[in-house]
Amino acid sequence: MSAVLNSVVGGAGGGGGGGGTTTAESATGLLDPDVETIIEEKNQLISRQYAEIERLQRELREVIGERDALICEVSKFKFEREMTDLKRLHDDRTQRGISISAGNKDLLVHCNKKRIDIS
C-alpha cells in the first residue's frame, strides 16, 4: 500500500529534482510504521466482517427455509381443519335434515290419521 502512495506522491512531484523525492520520503516515513499497521488492521477487520456476513447470510437462508417449511405445514393443518369442519357441518346438517324429515313424516302421518278419524 505504501508503494502505491509513494508512486502517487513521487509522481505528483514531476519525477525530477530532489523536491519530489523529499516529499515521497517524508510521506513514506509517516506512512510506513503507523499507517500500514492501521491499514493492515482495517483490512483484517474487513475480512473478518465479510466472513461473518457470509456466515450470517448462510444461516439466514437456512432459517428462511425452515420458516417456509413451517408456514407450509401450518397452511396444510389449517386446510385439513377447515375440511374437517366443513365435513362435520355437512354431516350435522344431514343428520338434522333426516331428523326433521322423520319428525315431519310422523307429524303428517299423525295429522292424516286425525283427518281420517274425523271423517
Image (cartoon, grey):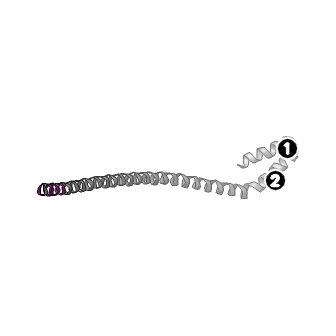
Q: Toward the viewer: 2 or 99?
A: 99
* Residue 7 falls left or right of residue 85: right
* Residue 81, image quadrant: bottom left
Residue type at mark 2 is Ser
Q: Earlier in the sequence, mark 1 or mark 2?
A: 1
* Residue 42 falls left or right of residue 80: right
Pointer 1 residue: 13
User: Which residue is at 73% across, 49% downward?
Assistant: 2
Q: Nearer the viewer, mark 1 or mark 2?
A: 1
- The dominant secondary structure in magenta is helix
Residue type at mark 1 is Gly
User: Which residue is at 75% across, 47% downward?
Assistant: 5
Percent x, y for residue 109?
Answer: 15, 55
Circle 2 Cα neighbour tier, 10 Å, few/some/many (<14 / 14–19 / ≥20): few
Q: Is residue 114 magenta?
A: yes
Residues in magenta, as a range: 107-117
Pointer 2 residue: 26
